[in-house]
Image (spheres, rainbow, N blue to C red):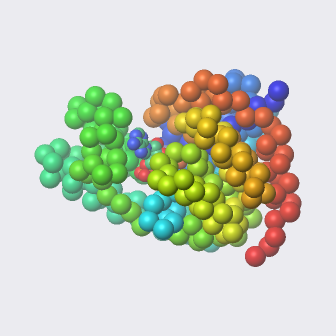
Amino acid sequence: MRLIDLHTHTTASDGSYTPAELVSMAADAGLSAIAITDHDTVAGNAEALEAGPPCGVEVVPGVEISVNHGGPSYHVLGYFIDYEHEPLLSSLESIRRFRDERNHKIVAKLNELGMSVTLTEIDAEARGESVGRPHVAAVLLRKGYVADTQEAFDKYLAKGKPAYIDRDRLSAADGIDLIRNAGGVAVFAHPGIYGWGEPGDLRRTVAEFAEMGIVGLEAYYSEHMPEDERSILALADEFGLVVTGGTDFHGTAKPEFELGRGTGNLAVPYELLEALKDRLGNRVEA
Ligand code: AMP
Ligand code: ZN
Ligand code: FE
Ligand code: FE
């Protein structure tokens, strides 16, 4: 069976391998296709697309955008975007400014808590342009304030912890439009990980996102339980959406997820990519 991984991060955001390294690792892992889905940046796509053909790996250009919807925030994946589209680039740049503002406030919180960290150190930890909490965690780790990345999130950086700062995000509708206007298709990322409160909340959110123009649900995902997969497959069927799958590979920044395999038994068939491509062809222009 030809296998793929449609959710990966590179050094352009918080992954630990460069786009070219990632493509070469995908070839070694026997994957037929991967998508590059860095947080709020498309800067890794050009290098990955160039590295693809010599390695025999099909590279799908992509992005992962954080959006707000009714309070909580969600991730939306964009595939087959034109990563040189000016409006996309300028919107992503403003989104990254929200990140920089947040990082500044996180540093202030950490300083208040008695830890000596600076924004310069955090920016230096990042190898690309999209700087986030994993880079803060790396500095805390390097300076001995925590024993590992997870402890940095659990003690300080996760939502509800003392150095957590929210940031501005696009609305879901604007995030989805951004992807569609850049020629791409939008997919609801890892719908199973959001800790849905009431039965029906997931279904309602899928219905709303479908109305806004998403074409698919990421059913196969490293942290999805079999029951998550089942309910997401049923919702895809109900709303006429395709399903996709990916690991959220970050390299050593998130060592528990292996490229193409997640925590061990993920196997995403190439046919899902073909179904996604069909949606690209059928896309109704706004
Ligand atoms: P940011 O983009 O700054 O909001 O950081 C998001 C990234 O941080 C995610 O893609 C994960 O890699 C990581 N992350 C978020 N929450 C946690 C958590 N509770 N534990 C470990 N890593 C996390
Ligand atoms: Zn990440
Ligand atoms: Fe995500
Ligand atoms: Fe991700």
Pick out the residue farthest to the front: 199
Q: Please state the horizontal and vertical placement of residue 42, each as a whole percent of the image.
A: 60, 55
Q: For this rendering, which residue is in front, 260 or 111?
A: 260
Quadrant location of the N terminus in the rendered image: top right
Which residue is depicted at the point 77% across and 51% down?
A: 237
Q: Is residue 113 above or below residue 78?
A: above
Q: Which percent across, then down, holds residue 105?
A: 27, 59
Q: Name the side, left or right, on which 277 lies relative to 142.
A: right
At 60% across and 70% down in the image, what residue appears?
A: 173
Report x, y in % for residue 153: 33, 41
Q: Left of 107 or right of it: where is 233? A: right
Q: Closer to the camera, 74 or 149?
A: 74
Q: Residue furthest bottom?
A: 286
Quick one: 145 or 231, which is closer to the camera? Answer: 231
User: Does the rendering let one see residue 35?
Assistant: no
Q: How many labels does the image show?
A: 0
Image spot of residue 65 (x, y percent): 55, 58
- Residue at horizontal 46%, vertical 53%? 197
Question: Who's the residue at 36% across and 35% down the image?
Answer: 150
Q: In this view, does 161 lie to the left or right of 53?
A: left
The quarter holding residue 3 reads top right
The quarter of the image holding the C terminus is bottom right
Above or below, 32 relative to 236: above
Judging depth in this view, the residue of 190 and 33 nearest the camera is 190
| Residue 155 visible within the image | yes
